[in-house]
Image: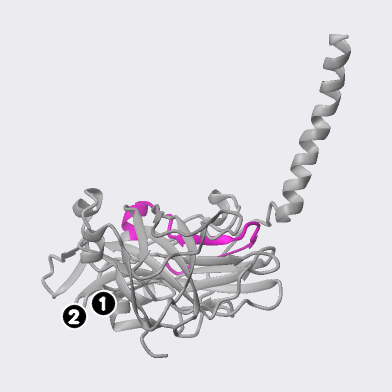
């Protein structure tokens, strides 16, 4: 009898496992595998350092795109960025901005992606550098699609967005810590099939990150990456969307009664964030930006380096609602901003 039961179980087990796999594929519609990446030397002729109808500059977020196939180009550049008023920081970027452009697509969409290394054109202060990209929203071979390319080269590949969420992208060239601390990161929003379960009045992208500057030895008044401070996890600035206290001067606009959605990403490279908005409560929190990971009635959301969350809240009345990293040393170093609903 026992032998018959065991035989029956062994016969059914593959069917059970297969059914589970099919269920997962049906839930997410996963697409695995992609053609090999293509390496080339064709550089853009335009001065703009990114292109694609699904891209926008944080904190702005474009509406959900139409169509299911999107062409996106991001250029790796070097530039002087102002991360603190009056400070010239030797930044490395995607799309010539820190953070890089926000990419918004839908679950199941295909992206034809091109990375162009234009460090040779834009370099002002260091030898041209090799760069790469790691898209956390994609499921690909890193050795093929995330390979490092030299200045003057392009790499084109395609990928399909299997999972909804808010994902980081960043340079993955050694040493990764330096490329991140120099500014090479950004956000990808993958909206679920059928959209989000709630409707909002305002939505914004907020990317937290750290900077570790030191005055460069050439004494030209500019600053560069400090490896020693970075390895000690001792940032000078912790910022929202690339600049010290940026959204105190450039508040995110809302009105009393508005439902606000923030797409929040902690790009790190080193520290956690305890994200909080003073004066309201997050009635919905989707960890990693996936509505399947829902929390309710949250005061603060802890987000690790490279992690994310979508937070939603209602503006309860007229006022200025300060968003902070509630690890207040980070707020003191610049991780503060305002959702301004002072006007009815």
- Crowdedness of circle 2 by 10 Å Cα count: few (<14), some, many (20+)? few
- The residue lying at 69 percent from left, 71 percent from top is 69
Q: Is residue 318 visible?
A: yes
Extent of the magenta region: 151-180
Tell how many labels: 2
Report if the CB atoms under discs 2 and 1 are less than 8 Å apart.
yes
Identify the element where label 2 is drawn.
loop
Q: Which residue is mark 1?
A: 82
- Image position, residue 227 (x, y; %): 23, 54
Q: Position of residue 280 (x, y in %)?
A: 40, 69
Q: Quadrant of the N terminus?
A: top right
Mark 2 = which residue? 86
Outermost residue on the left side: it is 219
Disc 1: CA contacts within 10 A as few (<14), some (14-19) or many (>=20): some
The image quarter in which residue 106 lies: bottom right
Q: Residue at x 66, y 69 (%)?
A: 195
Label ID, residue 68: none
Q: CA distance from mark 2 to mark 1?
A: 7 Å
237 on left or right of 301: left
């Amino acid at each position: 009898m026992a032998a018959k039961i065991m035989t029956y179980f062994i016969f059914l087990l593959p069917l059970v496992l297969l059914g589970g796999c099919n269920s997962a594929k049906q839930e997410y519609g996963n697409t695995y595998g992609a053609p090999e990446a293509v390496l080339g030397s064709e550089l853009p002729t335009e001065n703009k350092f990114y292109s694609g109808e699904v891209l926008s500059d944080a904190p702005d977020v474009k509406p959900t795109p139409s169509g299911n196939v999107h062409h996106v180009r991001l250029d790796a550049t070097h530039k002087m960025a102002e991360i603190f008023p009056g400070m010239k920081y030797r930044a490395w970027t995607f799309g010539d901005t820190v953070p890089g452009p926000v990419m918004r697509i839908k679950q199941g969409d295909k992206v034809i992606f091109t990375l162009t290394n234009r460090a040779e054109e834009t370099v002002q202060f260091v030898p041209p550098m090799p760069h790469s990209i790691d898209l956390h929203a994609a499921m690909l071979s890193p050795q093929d699609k995330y390979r490092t390319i030299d200045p003057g080269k392009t790499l084109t590949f395609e990928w399909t967005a299997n999972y909804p969420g808010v994902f980081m992208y960043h340079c993955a060239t050694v040493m990764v810590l330096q490329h991140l601390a120099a500014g090479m990161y950004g956000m990808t929003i993958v909206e679920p099939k059928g959209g989000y379960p709630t409707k909002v009045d305002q939505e914004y992208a907020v990317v937290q990150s750290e900077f570790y500057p030191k005055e460069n030895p050439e004494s030209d008044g500019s600053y560069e990456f400090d490896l020693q401070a970075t390895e000690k996890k001792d940032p000078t600035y912790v910022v929202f969307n690339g600049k010290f206290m940026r959204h105190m001067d450039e508040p995110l606009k809302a009105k009393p009664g508005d439902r606000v959605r923030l797409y929040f990403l902690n790009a790190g490279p080193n520290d956690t964030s305890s994200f909080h908005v003073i004066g309201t409560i997050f009635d919905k929190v989707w960890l990693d930006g996936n509505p399947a990971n829902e929390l309710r009635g949250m005061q603060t959301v802890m987000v690790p380096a490279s992690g994310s969350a979508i937070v939603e809240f209602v503006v309860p009345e007229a006022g200025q609602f300060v968003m902070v990293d509630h690890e207040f040393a980070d707020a003191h170093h610049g991780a503060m901003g305002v959702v301004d609903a002072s006007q009815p």
